[in-house]
Image (cartoon, rainbow, N blue to C red):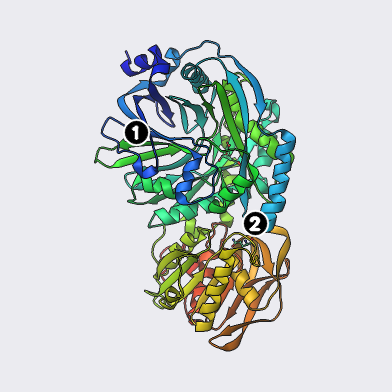
Amino acid sequence: MYPVLDAILRAPADQAWALLWREGQETVEVLRGTTADVARLADIPAAEEGHPVLAMVPFRQIAERGFAVRDDGTPLRVLTGTAYERVPVEAVVAALPTGEVEVTDERFSVSDEDYAAIVSRVIEEEIGNGEGANFVIRRDVLAHTATEPATAALTWLRRLLTDERGAYWTFAVHTPGHTLVGATPERHVSVEGGRVRMNPISGTFRHPADMADLEPAFRSFIADTKETEELFMVVDEEMKMMSQICTDGGRITGPYLKQMAHLTHTEYLLDGRSDADPRDVLRLTMFAPTVTGSPMENACTVITRHEPGGRGYYSGVLALLERDADGGEQLDAPILIRTAHLDDEGTVTVSAGATLVRHSDPVSEVAETTAKASGMLAALGLRPRRDISYAVPLAELDGVAEALGARNESLSPFWLSPQEARPDPDLLGRRVLVVDAADTWTQMLAHQVRHFGMAARVARWDEVTEQDLAAVDLVLFGPGPGDPDDPDDPRVTRLRDLLAARLAAGGPVLAVCLSHQILSRLAGLDVTRLERPNQGVQLPVDLWGHPARIGFYNTFVPRPGDAVVERAGVGTPLEAAVDPAHDAVVGLRGPGVASIQGHAESVLSRDGLGVLHRLIRHALGHEAGFDTEMSDIRRPGGKVS
Ligand SMILES: C=C(O[C@@H]1C=C(C(=O)O)C=C[C@H]1O)C(=O)O
Ligand SMILES: NC(=O)CC[C@H](N)C(=O)O
């Protein structure tokens, strides 16, 4: 009846195959084919009509971007479809094996106590040292089965198809030595006819065992600041990626709920357009901040410091390439979480991580990793199954839609709306060099700068020469991880030299976050740690008479004092904007110079666009006279001229 499925089920172990049930579909895609291991994403072969290509992308692939990773040798494996069909979900469930698969020797790779200790260390030593705002550290549940992997995977897939809900993909993929089965909630990225979508999910509500507690517990989850801020942080990090890939940036919709059998998550959808090749989109988005952290590059380093062993396929992606009707290639790539990996020795691995932020509680992060593994572990028969047939749809509870919608009131309208270009005639065509200090906020900054009509180019700190500085109208020095005073960090040293050179040459400068701190040091101010980091929080500040709500991602701050820089050979005093609540210098300005501690470009900056615009105008010597209401892009027909 279903020849491809039947052929797989007759001898599952002897061939390579995949069964994929994608969100919203009534059928399961069944794929049989040949496998090959390739070195790079660019080597993934093209899909032909009716012959999709499915790649298993391991976490170690991130080495392609030059980021730190433990090389555990897990292959980038490609399954090229030679036979393909769609089978109704019920027919698949009816055909899959129902036999017992015995799973024994269950243990954690990292104990509860050790994981809690890691959480405390990450908060203290990483977030507390300005290394970033959020980091995802994983641990593994390990077990053993004597059933051969292909049959075990098909049996567990059946359980997932009947027991799980809300998944983006429910799937099993079998290849020699590497078998994956799971139900993942999260789309990493998809590309379809030039439309690029990402789906950051963060904030995890663990369903209580007693259904009577569900509603009150859920209501306090929805109101929880930590869970809300955690989601904003990952949206910011994914918007950095979207800004780089999509010429028109991208907009945010949501928040929505993703209700599963054991957990409910909060999420946003990001939507933009790009004509980039799907392989490039994959490379530039390796990997999601929801499974690594932010800033993403440094998160990879932090992961190697705190996680023993490599990640295998965990937090990598499956990538399905298909040829569409117009001959273009489509990509759909879910994140490999809530997934079991089986090897030839019968080792079963289910990994799970939690997003650690400045106000994480070690005990509840331990519980979160356990809860995230529980859906898969229930399919393995290691945890109780949850009856989902009577669960209330949480999104429909009174007031929930309003509470979720209200979260957007504090966000930047710029990123929530379709963006029309609003060129400022004074800035039109002016050249901006955006110096990237290992944090791609620079992509969001460049996007907003272009929105003002300027021509922006982003270059990494180690590529920028002093000649490059001289060739542009404005140098925008960007944010970055680390301690602005660290004498052993070549990045910090280089930024300081470039900034000093630009100041000495007398050209316009705008410095953001880490670069604001380095500028402050050059100006003679002390820069010290905050008592509690402001990593991922919106704060009200007064910027020289303009009140604004701005997103902050910093651990260090410059302290008030006399600020003077050498500018074209002349000692030039800078005027500080001070946040008295934190005893912090949140902005500096002087002739041709402006800087800001917060991130005007952040989704968390309700008033960000207007602030960035004013700072740029200031640095370029256009003090007044232009409509600073520019940030209010919601005004219908609001014209800037
Ligand atoms: C890291 C995992 O999940 C991710 C982290 C989440 C969180 O910290 O709230 C939620 C969903 C996923 O994006 C995992 O399942 O291992
Ligand atoms: N986003 C940033 O540039 C952060 C600057 C610095 N690493 C701090 O944490 O204070």
**Most extreme residue toward the top, as rendered?**
99
- Per the image, the residue denoted by label 1 is 53
- Estimate the x, y position of residue 601 in percent, counting from the top left: 52, 62
Q: Which quadrant of the rendered structure holds the C terminus?
A: bottom left
Q: In front here: 119 or 29?
A: 119
Q: Secondary structure at mark 2?
A: strand
Q: Secondary structure at mark 1?
A: strand
Identified by mark 2, the residue type is: Gln
Q: Residue at x 72, y 37 (%)?
A: 114
Q: In front here: 318 or 106?
A: 106
Q: Which quadrant of the rendered structure holds the N terminus?
A: top left
Q: In front here: 495 or 284?
A: 495
Q: In this view of the protein, can residue 484 be seen by the observer?
A: yes
Q: Residue at x 44, y 56 (%)?
A: 243
Residue 389 lies left or right of residue 54; in this view the side is: right
145 in relation to 446, above or below: above
Identified by mark 1, the residue type is: Val
- Estimate the x, y position of residue 618 in percent, counting from the top left: 52, 78
- Estimate the x, y position of residue 76 in percent, counting from the top left: 43, 37
User: In which quadrant of the rendered view does residue 2 lie?
Assistant: top left
- Per the image, the residue denoted by label 2 is 535
Disc 1 crowd rating (10 Å Cα; few below 14, some 14-19, many 20+) is: many
Q: In this view of the protein, can residue 391 be seen by the observer?
A: no
User: Looking at the image, in which quadrant does ligand 2 appear?
Assistant: bottom right
Residue 328 lies left or right of residue 273; in this view the side is: left
Mark 2 vs mark 1: in front: 1
Residue 567 lies left or right of residue 64; in this view the side is: right
**Most extreme residue toward the left, as rendered?**
326
529 in relation to 622, above or below: above
Mark 2 / mark 1, whichever is N-terminal: 1
